[in-house]
Image (cartoon, helix red, strand yellow):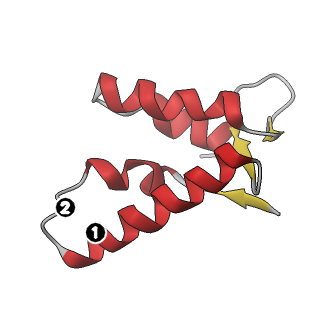
Amino acid sequence: MRIYLDNCVFNRPFDDQNHLRVRLETEAKLYVQARIKQGDLQLVWSYILEFENLQNPFQARKQTIAQWKNLASVSNPGHESGQLHWNH
């Protein structure tokens, strides 16, 4: 099964874990990541995830999330040139 984790999901473990909802979402995310590492799930990576992660002001978080691109078995490169174009 293919699964896409958005940037909010990747950042959830870095949030305040004192809140029950945040802690449960973090545990679910870590479970899914373990299944990806085991090969039970296929991670989908996208150009927008790459773009959003590059905007992350926290270098350690940015690097940790970027490493998941290497584990992705499916990638959606988006625009052919790899650049994002915004319509105004």
- Mark yes or no: residue 86 visible: no
Task: Name the residue tied to disc 1.
Answer: 22
Q: Position of residue 72 (x, y in %)?
A: 73, 38
Spot occupied by residue 87 in the image (x, y as percentages of width and height): 65, 45
Q: Is disc 1 surrounded by few (<14), some (14 to 19) or many (20+) residues within 10 Å?
A: some
With respect to residue 52, does 24 lie above or below?
below
Report the amino acid beneath label 1. Answer: Val
At a point 67% along the width and 50% down the height, the residue shown is 36
Visible in this render: residue 56?
A: yes
Q: Earlier in the sequence, mark 1 or mark 2?
A: 2
Q: Position of residue 40 (x, y in %)?
A: 76, 56
Query: 10 Å neighbourhood of mark 2: few (<14), some, or many (≥20)?
Result: some
Rendered-image quadrant of the N terminus: bottom right
**Residue drawn at x 28%, y 69% as measured from the top left:** 22
Q: Dot 2 corresponds to which residue?
A: 17
> In this orientation, which residue lies closer to the viewer: 72 or 32?
32
Q: Residue at x 71, y 26 (%)?
A: 83
Which residue occupies the extreme front position in the image? 38
CB-based contact (under 8 Å), mark 1 and mark 2: yes
Task: Determine whether the residue tagged by mark 2 lies in a helix, strand or loop.
Answer: loop
Examine the rendered structure and indicate whether residue 29 appears above or below residue 81. below
> Is residue 70 shown left or right of residue 32?
right
The amino acid type, in three-letter code, at marker 2 is Gln
Residue 65 in picture, x, y percent from top left: 48, 35
User: Looking at this view, is 52 or 62 the one in front?
Assistant: 62
